[in-house]
Image: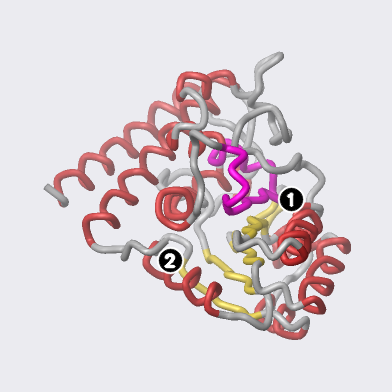
Amino acid sequence: MDEPLHDQKLHYLEAVANHLRELVIEMLVKAGSGHSAGPLGMADIFAALYFHVLQHDPKRPNWTGRDRVVLSNGHICPILYATLAYAGYFPVEELKTLRALNSRLQGHPHRGSLPGIETTSGPLGSGLSQAVGMALAARMDKARHRVYCLASDGEHDEGNFWEAVMLAGKERLSNLTVVVDRNNIQIDGFTEHVLPLDSLHAKYEAFNWHVLEIDGHNMVQFVDAVHEAIAVYERPTVIIAHTIPGRGVKFMERDFNWHGKAPNKVEAKEALAELRTLGRRIESEHE
């Protein structure tokens, strides 16, 4: 991540994020099931992560020097699949097999099924424990790669998540960065109605974490936060990314009903038209 995030690169990342959203909609409508809100909301983070931040090589997915990405909130895997395919880990055409029988792209990621998938995820709250183990192992091996764990805000309802938070803080795992998708929704409603989480900032600080809060759709803020996390040597870092669930599709935005629902053909057509209009606008602004 030595390259600065100059205007040209930022424009490129914005276009990538918008295209990833299109791929997500196309995947979901073909599958007829899956999660819409979270994948759309995290597209900007994924674009910046895989196309600017990470040390990785799609041609060598098992390269030992690669940064590790753990998707704890496995239900948003459509955005992970779309990103990996667009980066060159597997053919983009395969995205249309999401959730199909015998497909490599199941409703939650499965380690070994696809290149670039580091862990099997599904039970919420488990991913951070896996990431902590990876970070501890890397430190024991004196390895220089970093571990990034992507987590939802709703999975902070799980007790085992906080056990991992405490262990990471106790072990001062400075090679670990957690990115929390703070979109304020979960399948049963708004997080603060289901089981209030705030103040996440104060909670993490209490467990010896370096805490940053950003606009999850501002890639400059995200990249700056990652730079700061790398510079912190005495504790793990959490980036609380405030996002809009369903970002880019107006009728989905901030509606918790889209947490675990796929668009039908009519809805997908409307969503894709909106995203493609935005894509043309991005292109015209940067010509």
Residue assigned mark 1: 188
Q: CA distance from mark 1 to mark 2?
A: 32 Å
Task: Give whichever of 79, 148 is nearer the camera.
Answer: 148
* Most distant residue in the front direction: 142
Disc tally is 2
Q: Under tag 1, what secondary structure?
A: loop
> Which range of residues does the magenta coloring cover?
61-80
Q: Indicate which label's residue lies in the foreground, 1 or 2.
A: 2
Return the mark for residue 41. none
The residue sitting at 56% across, 77% down in the picture is 212
> Reading the chain from its start, which is encountered first: label 1 or label 2?
1
Q: Is residue 133 left or right of residue 138?
A: right
Task: Give whichever of 80, 188 is nearer the camera.
Answer: 80
The residue sitting at 56% across, 40% down in the picture is 80
- Label 2, residues with CA under 10 Å away: few <14, some 14-19, many ≥20: some
Query: Which colouring convention does the figure follow?
Result: secondary structure
Q: What is the x, y in percent for residue 203? A: 74, 80
Q: Is residue 226 left or right of residue 64?
A: left
The residue sitting at 26% across, 53% down in the picture is 11
Return the mark for residue 223. 2
* Most distant residue in the top direction: 101
Amino acid under label 1? Asp
